[in-house]
Image (cartoon, rainbow, N blue to C red):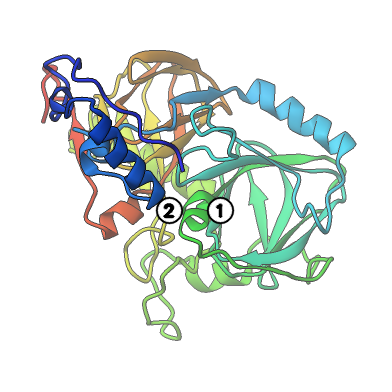
């Protein structure tokens, strides 16, 4: 256990709490602190600034990963690293530079680029962590979830909720890459993880246009009477790009017709939902898609909880706290808790977003602050 470090009473007067009111350093006080150390005790007055900050201060850093850099590295791993039992997936995690080398994008979210070569198969397994795939380019891979083959194509958002067997097979002569998102850090922190191997080969190599679950569930505004009970996670295995694209285009078209259809002028957005509850697609992960028109800038927004974005198409500039980054197709960036984000679109800019917000909403610890157009707060 680390030794308690005494704080001299020289802290500036504007230091939060009463750090400048620490007791005088005396032999008796040091003896008391040694006794605390021996009994694995830590007095609140020494730690209150870290334990109860004035506002969230995430260990994670805002950070950007360039698709033009990480995709070639994933392709190189395809030449050198086999995919199969043991390693399970050729997935390369985004490691936030503020998290001490852990393979975590944020303290609660895991994101990775996964690469599957021609005719390759990733074996089946299941785990308690919730997972999804988002495809920024390519097609030809089917993910098989509990024996149901689901096609993966550009712009599709695909679910693998926790404890469902799943594997992937590429039935083409071309490689394919996509991003995986999971709640691995949250599950690891709470000591709730289970994992189980499935077959070395996927249970089917069928390649249907539509999965069985899509045939059952994906009819707008309709729900099968055979499944009326609420489900913790969405039964829809794939939210298809053509529907996402149309929903965003129609929002902007309604705005042009004078209806208040968008989040803010020139900014359309949709949230993927669970049709059995109307809530988030998974109990720990929120997923959205945003479209910002060329020339538009979104207002600054910060919230409790963290998010990862991937640029689906277009170019622009994102402001993360005090830093600006130019972004283009495929780039990924992290927005830590209580970090202000705004987006300036140079061309029409499409952004996929996933976040840990459902966790904090259930704990009643969620909070959002949005800059007003005049520069104040709303």
Mark 2 Cα-neighbour bin, 10 Å: few <14, some 14–19, many ≥20: many
Cβ atoms at labels 2 and 1 below 8 Å apart = yes
Q: Residue 283: where, in percent of width, then height?
A: 40, 62
Q: Nearer the viewer, residue 319 or 14?
A: 14
| Residue 250 lies in quadrant | top left
Tag of residue 132: 1
For the point 60% across and 40% down, which residue is it?
103
Residue designated by label 2: 285
Q: Residue 360: where, in percent of width, then height?
A: 30, 52
For the point 52% across and 23% down, which residue is it?
64
For the point 60% across and 67% down, which residue is it?
194
Q: Earlier in the sequence, mark 2 or mark 1?
A: 1
Q: Residue 68: where, in percent of width, then height?
A: 66, 21
Residue farthest along the bottom direction in this orientation? 226
Q: Residue 262: where, in percent of width, then height?
A: 25, 37
Up the image or down, 243 lies above or below 362; here it is above
């Amino acid at each position: 256990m680390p030794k308690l470090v005494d704080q001299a009473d020289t802290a500036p007067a504007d230091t939060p709490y009463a750090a400048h009111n620490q007791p005088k350093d005396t032999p008796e006080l040091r003896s008391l602190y040694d006794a605390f150390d021996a009994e694995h005790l830590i007095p609140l007055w020494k730690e209150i600034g870290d334990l109860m900050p004035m506002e969230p201060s995430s260990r994670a850093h805002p950070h950007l990963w360039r698709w033009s850099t990480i995709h070639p590295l994933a392709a190189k791993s395809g030449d050198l690293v086999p995919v199969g039992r043991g390693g399970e997936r050729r997935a390369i995690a985004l490691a936030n530079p503020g998290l001490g080398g852990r393979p975590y994008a944020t303290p609660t979210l895991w994101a990775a680029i996964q690469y599957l070569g021609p005719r390759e198969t990733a074996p089946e397994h299941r785990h308690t962590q919730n997972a999804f795939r988002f495809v920024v380019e390519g097609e030809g891979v089917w993910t098989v979830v509990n024996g149901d083959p689901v096609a993966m194509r550009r712009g599709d958002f695909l679910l693998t909720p926790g404890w469902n067997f799943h594997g992937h097979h590429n039935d083409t002569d071309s490689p394919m890459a996509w991003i995986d998102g999971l709640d691995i850090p949250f599950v690891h922190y709470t000591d709730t993880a289970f994992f189980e191997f499935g077959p070395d080969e996927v249970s089917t190599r069928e390649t249907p246009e539509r999965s069985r679950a899509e045939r059952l569930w994906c009819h707008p505004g309709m729900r099968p009477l055979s499944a009326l009970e609420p489900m913790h996670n969405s039964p829809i295995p794939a939210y298809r790009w053509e529907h996402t694209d149309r929903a965003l285009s129609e929002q902007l078209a309604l705005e042009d017709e004078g209806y208040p259809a968008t989040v803010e002028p020139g900014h359309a957005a949709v949230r993927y939902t669970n049709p059995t509850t109307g809530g988030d697609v998974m109990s720990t992960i929120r997923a959205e898609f945003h479209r910002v028109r060329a020339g538009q800038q979104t207002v600054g927004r910060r919230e409790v909880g963290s998010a990862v974005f991937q640029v689906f198409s277009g170019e622009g500039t994102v402001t993360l706290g005090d830093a600006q980054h130019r972004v283009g197709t495929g780039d990924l960036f992290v927005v830590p808790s209580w970090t202000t984000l705004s987006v300036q679109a140079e061309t029409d800019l499409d952004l996929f977003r996933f976040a840990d917000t459902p966790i904090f909403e259930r704990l009643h610890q969620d909070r959002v602050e949005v800059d007003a157009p005049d520069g104040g707060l709303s």
